[in-house]
Image (cartoon, rainbow, N blue to C red):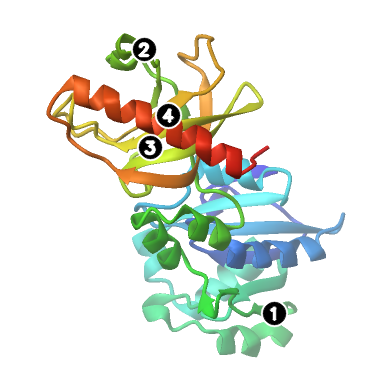
């Protein structure tokens, strides 16, 4: 996959199958759009996902999105939502961006897709121009879960409640965060259970602050563990968002390594304890919760 920042950097000359949107979290609805553009992909037609960069919190960081899409599509274009783009008339967007720049032969969008200044651009307008401009239009209906439309908003609501089963059902995979293991206060080591700390990117939406059973990927291998998401109020007043995990059956040095933490099951909300001894006692219960969780739920 070729990764491009800014539509002006795209210099492809051949035909494309294009899908467009915010794609701030690649849920099951987004995956249907991706599958459709890939169905058109061949040596004469490249699959292109054009993601509008809204510069706000997202379910996926740009890096996570690139890693997820790598090997699935031909081009990922991150298109900053600038004043120029926001004020571009819909007809101009079709002519200048879709046709002249991207050479779109197939356009694939969701049923609520709107574009152009004042969101004047619609499915009907795309359909109207299709014959004249020589592209086909596929309008993909919304994916549903238990009769409700799957959306990034729905997933955010699930995360805010710590409902990781629902979030995974809407996404099609467990919600996760990736980061580099940093040096912390080493309090966990002092208490007898050394932990790994990662600081998520600022744009990354985190699930409800609290303790989770976690599945952790490191050095190409998956481990079970338990982790805390939050600001660790018992030991610091910095209010810095951190993900801190204890990994079962791992004794190596993880500092500086990249790990991915999947949040599998919510145990309890983050709590400020009155003493370190009270914290230690609760952490022992958390570790037992994690072990019991993975005895019931198998992850590989």
Q: Secondary structure at mark 4?
A: helix
* Nearer to us: label 4 or label 3: 4
Asked if the residue at tag 3 contacts the one at tag 2, i.e. Cβ–Cβ closer than 8 Å, the answer is no
Find the distance from the CA under tag 4 to the CA under tag 3: 27 Å
Find the distance from the CA under tag 4 to the CA under tag 2: 12 Å
Q: Is residue 177 left or right of residue 162?
A: right
The quadrant of the picture occupied by the C terminus is: top right
Q: Secondary structure at mark 2?
A: loop
Q: Earlier in the sequence, mark 2 or mark 1?
A: 1
Dot 2 surroundings within 10 Å: few (below 14), some, or many (20 or more)? few
Where is residue 178 shown, x and y percent of the image?
A: 49, 34
Find the distance from the CA under tag 1 to the CA under tag 4: 52 Å
Find the distance from the CA under tag 2 to the CA under tag 1: 60 Å
Where is residue 128 shown, x and y percent of the image?
A: 63, 90
User: Which residue is tagged 2?
Assistant: 192
User: Which residue is tagged 3?
Assistant: 201
* Nearer to us: label 1 or label 4: 4
Vertical arrangement, residue 98 with respect to residue 231, above or below: below
Q: Secondary structure at mark 3?
A: loop
Q: Earlier in the sequence, mark 4 or mark 2?
A: 2
Q: Nearer the viewer, residue 128 or 49?
A: 49
Q: Nearer the viewer, residue 240 or 8?
A: 240
Q: Earlier in the sequence, mark 1 or mark 4?
A: 1
For the point 42% across and 29% down, the residue is: 287
User: Which residue is tagged 1?
Assistant: 137
């Amino acid at each position: 996959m070729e990764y491009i920042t800014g539509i002006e950097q795209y210099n492809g000359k051949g035909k494309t199958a294009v899908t467009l949107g915010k794609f701030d979290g690649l849920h099951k609805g987004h995956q249907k759009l991706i599958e459709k553009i890939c169905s058109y992909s061949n040596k004469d037609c490249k699959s292109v996902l054009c993601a509008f960069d809204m510069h706000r919190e997202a379910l996926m960081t740009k890096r996570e999105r690139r890693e997820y899409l790598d090997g699935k599509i031909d081009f990922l274009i991150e298109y900053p939502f600038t004043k120029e783009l926001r004020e571009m008339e819909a007809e101009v967007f079709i002519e200048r961006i879709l046709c002249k720049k991207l050479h779109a032969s197939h356009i694939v969008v969701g049923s609520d897709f709107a574009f152009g200044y004042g969101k004047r651009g619609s499915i009907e307008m795309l359909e109207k121009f299709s014959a004249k401009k020589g592209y086909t239009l596929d309008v993909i209906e919304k994916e549903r879960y238990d009769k409700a439309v799957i959306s990034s908003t729905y997933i955010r609501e699930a995360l805010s409640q710590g409902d990781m089963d629902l979030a995974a059902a809407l996404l099609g995979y467990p919600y996760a965060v990736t980061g580099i293991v940093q040096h912390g206060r080493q309090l966990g080591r002092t208490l007898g259970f050394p932990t790994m700390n990662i600081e998520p990117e600022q744009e990354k939406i985190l699930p409800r602050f609290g303790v989770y059973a976690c599945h952790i990927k490191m050095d190409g291998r998956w481990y079970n563990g338990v982790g805390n998401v939050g600001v660790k109020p018992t030991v610091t007043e910095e209010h810095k968002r951190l993900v801190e995990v204890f990994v079962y059956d791992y004794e190596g040095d993880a500092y500086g390594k990249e790990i991915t933490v999947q949040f599998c099951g919510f145990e309890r909300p983050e709590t400020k304890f009155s003493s370190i001894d009270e914290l230690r006692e609760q952490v022992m219960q958390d570790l037992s919760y994690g072990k019991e969780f993975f005895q019931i739920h198998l992850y590989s």
